Image (cartoon, grey):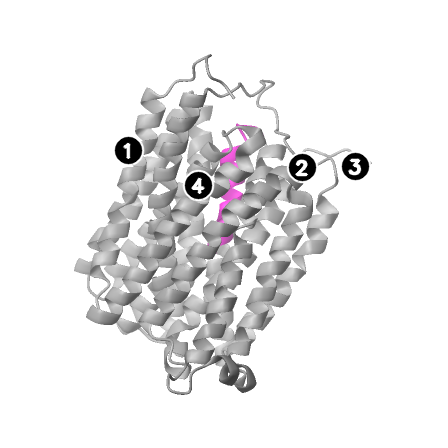
């Protein structure tokens, strides 16, 4: 039997979710931070790099639907360790791209780096597939243990693991580089650490803690049945939101280190340390977004209005990406990038809170389908951007586009909050 849980237990679980998100981002970002180095060592040019990110995105889209379906049926208690070990193993296997016996078999002697690229493509695709399972598991867990009033802060804690992992990854890689370690070592170390998360999860979560189809009460209220037409409006708005904020966050995540090193000619160390600062400020923005919602609710604003207000602030900061091409090298560039990162990540907790309002029975698969739409869009953008940069050497069009995209998400969220109202007919 699961022992009685004290009031602090739910926040310890949120801490475990934060660690899982941190590990996910460390595995994901290790390639981004080392990409410029690999450009020279294994011929990983911009087009190939864009292809890796594109396939990662498509695999993430597929994994979101697949693991969303599974999460709805078996719950996160058993699924979460499986997907985390899966993506950690993909990270651990990545350095085999430098193993001559392997790359000679899968490569083309007439195309330098072809074997290494094909192995990276396989590992990156598997990484995206398994990492997708993190989000339905994490969101279902948070929904099950947190009330509506606690979810803004809980989601911010969960999402802040993304920036924490992104802060640590450049520092870890720079430390390895300072000791003369090869590029392969960070992949191995980070992948191995990920597997150590599993015993923590097993210790914290018992069979009754995250039951399939369960949901935490909200101030003593039961969740109402959702009208079909209302659900369709909700899904359309959520799809617009997740696509636009996904573009703003994921494009910068993949290309920012390369942009600083190759366009503004910052050194490896300067670019890597700034990248850590970028994600540290993004973490602050993420936590501040959730805290702002809680603060507004405590002062009498409705939950919808508070979420919309916080989302609008975040979108305004993310839109600064559109002016980055007009800014030269220097402190102003760094300042604008920091605000942009805080806004792009801070928008996500508000999206997660909306997803957790979806019908409990179908939340895993619906959240997976929504994530898939975002990652397909991100994948198309990654591939197109890689080819564009390879051809023109310019990041400008991409920066402008992903900066303005979340404005469409803000309009969708506002329209849904104003015009959609549940009705008693056609509920599910």
Give me the C-alpha separation between circle 2 and circle 1.
34 Å
The residue shown at (56%, 86%) is 101
Question: Residue at 52% of width from left, 83% of height from top?
Answer: 105
User: Residue 272's spot in the image, x, y percent?
Assistant: 40, 69
The answer to whether residue 116 is magenta is no
Q: Which residue is mark 4?
A: 370
| Residue at x 30% of width, y 47% of height | 318
Q: Which residue is mark 3?
A: 2
Residue pushed farthest left?
326
Looking at the rendering, the stretch of residues picked out in magenta corresponds to 147-163
Mark toward the viewer: 4 or 2: 4
Please give the label number shown on residue 411.
1
User: Which is nearer the N-term, disc 1 or disc 3?
Assistant: 3
Q: Is residue 26 visible?
A: no
Between circles 4 and 1, the one closer to the viewer is 4
**Badge 2 is on which residue?**
210
Q: Is residue 280 visible?
A: yes
In space, the residues marked 3 and 2 are separated at their CA atoms by: 11 Å
């Amino acid at each position: 039997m699961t022992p009685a849980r004290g009031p602090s237990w739910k926040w310890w679980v949120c801490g475990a979710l934060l660690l899982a998100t941190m590990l996910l981002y460390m595995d994901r970002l290790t390639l981004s931070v080392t990409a410029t180095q690999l450009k020279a060592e294994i011929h990983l040019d911009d087009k190939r790099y864009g292809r890796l990110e594109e396939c990662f995105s498509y695999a993430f889209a597929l994994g979101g639907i697949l693991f969303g379906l599974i999460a709805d049926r078996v719950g996160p208690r058993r699924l979460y360790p499986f997907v985390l070990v899966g993506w950690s193993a993909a990270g651990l296997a990545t350095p085999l791209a430098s193993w001559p016996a392997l790359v000679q078999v899968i490569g083309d002697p007439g195309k330098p780096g072809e074997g290494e690229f094909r192995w990276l493509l396989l590992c990156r695709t598997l990484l995206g597939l398994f990492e997708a399972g993190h989000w339905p598991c994490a969101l279902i867990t948070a929904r099950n243990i947190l009330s509506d009033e606690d979810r803004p802060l809980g989601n911010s804690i969960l999402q802040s693991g993304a920036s924490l992992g992104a802060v640590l990854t450049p520092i870890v890689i720079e430390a390895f580089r300072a000791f003369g370690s090869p590029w392969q070592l960070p992949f191995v170390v980070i992948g191995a650490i990920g597997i150590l998360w599993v015993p923590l999860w097993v210790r914290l979560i018992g069979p009754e803690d995250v039951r399939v189809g369960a949901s935490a009460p909200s101030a003593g209220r039961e969740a109402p049945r959702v009208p079909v037409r209302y659900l369709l409006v909700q899904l359309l708005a959520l799809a617009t939101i997740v696509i636009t904020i996904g573009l703003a966050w994921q494009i910068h995540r993949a290309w920012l280190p390369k942009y600083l090193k190759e366009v503004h000619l910052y050194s490896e160390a300067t670019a890597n340390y700034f990248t850590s600062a970028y994600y540290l400020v993004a973490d602050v923005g993420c936590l501040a977004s959730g805290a702002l919602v809680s603060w507004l609710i405590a002062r009498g604003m409705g939950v919808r209005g508070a979420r919309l207000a916080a989302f609008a602030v975040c979108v305004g900061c993310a839109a600064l990406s559109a002016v980055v091409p007009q800014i030269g090298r220097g402190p102003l560039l760094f300042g604008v990038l920091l605000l942009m990162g805080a806004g792009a990540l801070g928008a996500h907790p508000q999206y997660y809170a909306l997803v957790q309002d979806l019908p409990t029975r179908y939340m895993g698969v619906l959240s997976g389908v929504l994530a898939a739409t975002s990652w397909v869009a991100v994948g198309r953008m990654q591939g197109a951007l890689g080819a564009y940069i390879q051809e023109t050497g310019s990041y400008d069009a991409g920066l402008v586009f992903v900066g303005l995209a979340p404005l469409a998400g803000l309009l969708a969220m506002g329209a849904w909050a104003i015009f959609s109202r549940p009705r008693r007919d056609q509920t599910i």
